[in-house]
């Protein structure tokens, strides 16, 4: 049993008098609750889905009350491995329980109740956010009018698990990890940076890497310098170093485990029984170059829903940007979300 529980969250727009205009945004693996806008004018970056949330945007804050909460297990304000265990007065570290995506959504129900929202118009999210949206629809059918899973899967493939296994080994082999008992000011930086690089490769695609980097050698390096690097190598190293500064290692491991464990049919007799509980309309998106959660995995779920006679809409989006397509090219599909939400709002 985990408690007391803290959930960090942000809201955008205004909850109407009927409390009927809420849209729940679920973030991906290393995301946070800061989905849009800037906290201060000096902030270098806006929230991670700022293109989507705001007045006149897809999630129009003049119409909708948008909620985004940080998942449990993370390090951005919600209870996770870096939190103080009230039983010991010390950080949980590896005493934090193994969590599943289903547990994240259970925690979100507590926040929904705290906000006084009986039912949300939609739950929308990409990657791990798509998993959360699906869990909402299956396990809390009375609390959600629709779901919009983007670049998701019903269960990660052995290949996806294998990539996370490599990331874990990179961390475990770093002597600074100390079986999770590292000091925050001295994290296993080399291991975490390499783990992030492994993960980041899976978010890209061959086409996007060719477009952005090709086989170009770093300008500062000589081609025949033994330690010289291609631009793609420098990019991965840079991305890894930056990640160490903003994310906790144990949180990375716990959320990776939650991704690997995800199976929509967990606790059911099979996929049909699990998806038979999804009664609300759903709108699904997959991307042609996504090899982490390829379109076939979304299409498997959509096919079952259609066979069960559920109201389901599916769109395969042509994009060269791999798994990250939903963040890089939102203009290719978000107009469909606007239309879908219009219909859901009109029916509710």
Image (spheres, helix red, strand yellow):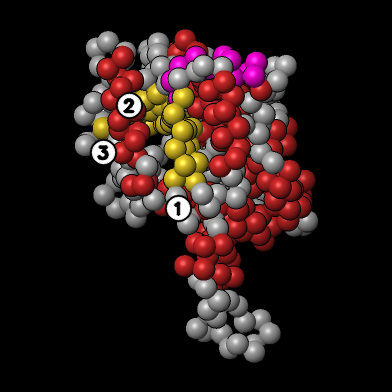
- Residue 234 lies, with reference to residue 263, above or below; the image says below
Residue for point 52% across, 84% down: 220
- Residue 303 lies, with reference to residue 244, above or below; the image says above
Question: CA gap, disc 2 to disc 1?
Answer: 23 Å
Question: CA gap, disc 3 to disc 2?
Answer: 12 Å
Q: On the rendered image, what quadrant is the N terminus found in? A: top right
Residue for point 69% across, 57% down: 191
Q: Say few, some or many: other residues with alpha carbon within 10 Å of mark 2 (under 14 / 14 to 19 / 20 or more).
A: many
Q: Say few, some or many: other residues with alpha carbon within 10 Å of mark 1 (under 14 / 14 to 19 / 20 or more).
A: many
* Residue beneath disc 2: 341
Q: Quick one: 306 or 161, which is closer to the camera?
A: 306
Question: CA gap, disc 1 to disc 3?
Answer: 21 Å
Q: For residue 31, say whether it is visible.
A: no
Q: Picture quarter containing residue 157?
A: top right
Q: Picture quarter containing residue 139?
A: top right
Residue 319 got which mark? Answer: 1
Q: Position of residue 278 (x, y in %)?
A: 53, 17
Q: Say few, some or many: other residues with alpha carbon within 10 Å of mark 3 (under 14 / 14 to 19 / 20 or more).
A: some
Q: For residue 206, say whether it is visible.
A: yes
Q: Position of residue 307 (x, y in %)?
A: 57, 20
Q: On the rendered image, what quadrant is the C terminus found in? A: top left
Q: Is residue 273 magenta?
A: yes
Q: Position of residue 222 (x, y in %)?
A: 58, 88
Count of numbered labels shown in the rendering: 3
Residue for point 65% across, 56% down: 198
Tag in front: 1 or 3? 1
- Residue 158 lies, with reference to residue 124, above or below; the image says below
Callout 2: SS = helix
* Residue beneath disc 3: 57
Magenta region, residue range: 272-282
Callout 1: SS = loop
Query: Of marks 1 and 3, which one's residue comes earlier in the chain?
Result: 3
């Amino acid at each position: 049993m985990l408690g007391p529980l803290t959930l960090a969250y942000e809201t955008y727009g205004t909850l109407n008098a009927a409390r009927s205009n809420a849209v729940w945004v679920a973030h991906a693996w290393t995301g946070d609750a800061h989905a849009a806008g800037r906290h201060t004018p000096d902030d270098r970056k806006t929230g991670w889905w700022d293109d989507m949330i705001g007045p006149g945007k897809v999630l129009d804050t003049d119409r909708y009350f948008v909620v985004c909460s940080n998942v449990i297990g993370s390090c951005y304000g919600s209870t996770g491995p870096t939190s103080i265990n009230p039983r010991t007065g010390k950080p949980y570290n590896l005493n934090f329980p193994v969590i599943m995506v289903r547990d994240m959504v259970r925690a979100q129900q507590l926040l929904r109740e705290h906000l006084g929202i009986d039912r949300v118009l939609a739950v929308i999210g990409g990657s791990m956010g798509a998993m959360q949206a699906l869990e909402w629809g299956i396990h809390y059918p009375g609390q959600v009018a629709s779901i919009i899973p983007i670049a998701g899967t019903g269960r990660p493939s052995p290949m996806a698990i294998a990539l996370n296994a490599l990331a874990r080994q990179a961390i475990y082999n770093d002597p600074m990890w100390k079986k999770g008992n590292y000091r925050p000011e001295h994290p296993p930086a080399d291991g975490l940076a390499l783990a992030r690089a492994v993960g980041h490769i899976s978010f890209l695609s061959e086409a996007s890497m060719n477009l952005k980097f090709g086989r170009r050698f770093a300008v500062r390096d000589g081609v025949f310098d033994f330690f010289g690097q291609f631009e793609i190598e420098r990019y991965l190293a840079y991305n890894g170093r930056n990640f160490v500064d903003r994310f906790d290692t144990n949180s990375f491991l716990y959320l990776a485990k939650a991704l690997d464990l995800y199976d929509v049919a967990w606790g059911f007799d099979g996929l049909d029984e699990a998806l038979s509980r999804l009664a609300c309309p759903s709108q699904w998106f997959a991307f042609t170059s996504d090899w982490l959660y390829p379109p076939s995995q979304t299409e498997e779920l959509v096919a079952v829903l259609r066979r069960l006679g559920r109201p389901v809409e599916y769109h395969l989006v042509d994009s060269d940007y791999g798994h990250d397509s939903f963040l890089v090219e939102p203009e290719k599909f978000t107009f469909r979300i606007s239309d879908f939400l219009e219909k859901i709002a009109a029916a509710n």
